[in-house]
Amino acid sequence: MYIDKRVESILSPFVHYSLYKVRKPRIRLEKSMLITSVDIDVGKEVLGVLNRGKYDVNVRGKSKISYSERSIGKIEEQALPLIMSFFNKQEIRATFAVRGQLLEVDDSILDSLDGSSVKHEIAAHGYYHSDFTRLTHKGADLELKVISDKLKSYNIVPRSFIFPKNKVAHLGLLERHGYKCYRGNGSVISDAMDIKKEGQLYDVRPSLFVGNCTNVRLTRNMINIAVQKRLPFHIWLHSWNLGLDRKSIAARIERFLSPLYTYAKSKEKSGVLTIETMISAIEKISVIS
């Protein structure tokens, strides 16, 4: 049965909330964690112009709506400074996953993150935004090498990996290239408040995708469940899913992100929740383990 994707995005938080309310926890932490990861799929309009669809003819989000690389880059140019400014003002640490190819044309995003007043994590999001399930072992090895080398040239050693298009594959290569964790592939049913060890890697499971229709009240209630059960709650987003222009993005930040993270900060102040990046979360998990 076909379900309109906008309807699906509205219904998704209801399904997540219902499942998390009844699901038996697999782990229990000393206190709950809120983890945030942001995927930078293109970063700049100029990258999409130069590629001319060579690597991503279209970029698709959870809504399954497709946009050209150039369109995504243009939106992210407007969205990323607003998101970074918001997180810095709220003192929220987040994991930003950078596409390596972006650094061939512009490194201002790295400068902004590295010089931030808040200690964000800079993670890897592949080099060409390639689907890892379609790469050979050799191709995946090369992609991981070039993104790691590129970030290391900026004195950044990536420890978290977010698979482009959320297509998880070649985990053994992640270990070889020094990664400690990744964000697994999620869906309405498979999303979880969980961090699971796979070999020497940690899968920091996605708990909820935040789009333009995500309900703030239900998301706060999911934070309450995570606090009650002492679980990690990992929300993730593409910056371009918040809106298509600066005005709509700023409005979405004000209406959704601001009340959500204000609530999370109140829980942090109460001592029942910590705000983490992917790597800081697994560092705490490994100590607990």
Image (tube, rainbow, N blue to C red):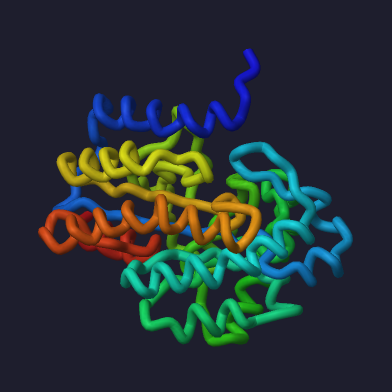
Q: Residue at x 78, y 48 (%)?
A: 58
Q: Position of residue 38 (x, y in %)?
A: 51, 59
Quarter holding the N terminus? top right
Q: In this view of the protein, can residue 71 be seen by the observer?
A: yes
243 relative to 70 in the view: left or right? left
Of residue 253 and residue 198, the one placed in the foreground of this image is 253
Q: Quadrant of residue 120?
A: bottom left
- Quick check: 194 left or right of 121? left
Q: Position of residue 224 (x, y in %)?
A: 21, 42
Q: How many marks?
A: 0
Q: Is residue 164 above or below residue 103?
A: above
Residue furthest out toward the left: 270
- Towards the viewer: 224 or 245: 245
From the viewer's side, name the closer residue of 199 and 82: 82
**In the image, is residue 166 above or below residue 20?**
below
Q: Position of residue 215 (x, y in %)?
A: 40, 39
Seen in the image, is 71 located left or right of residue 4?
Answer: right
Viewer-closest of 19 and 178: 19
Residue at 29% of width from left, 39% of height from top? 222
Rendered location of residue 87, percent (x, y): 40, 68
Residue sitting at x 22%, y 55%: 289
Q: State the residue lying farthest toward the top.
A: 1
Residue name at image x 11 percent, y 60 percent: 271
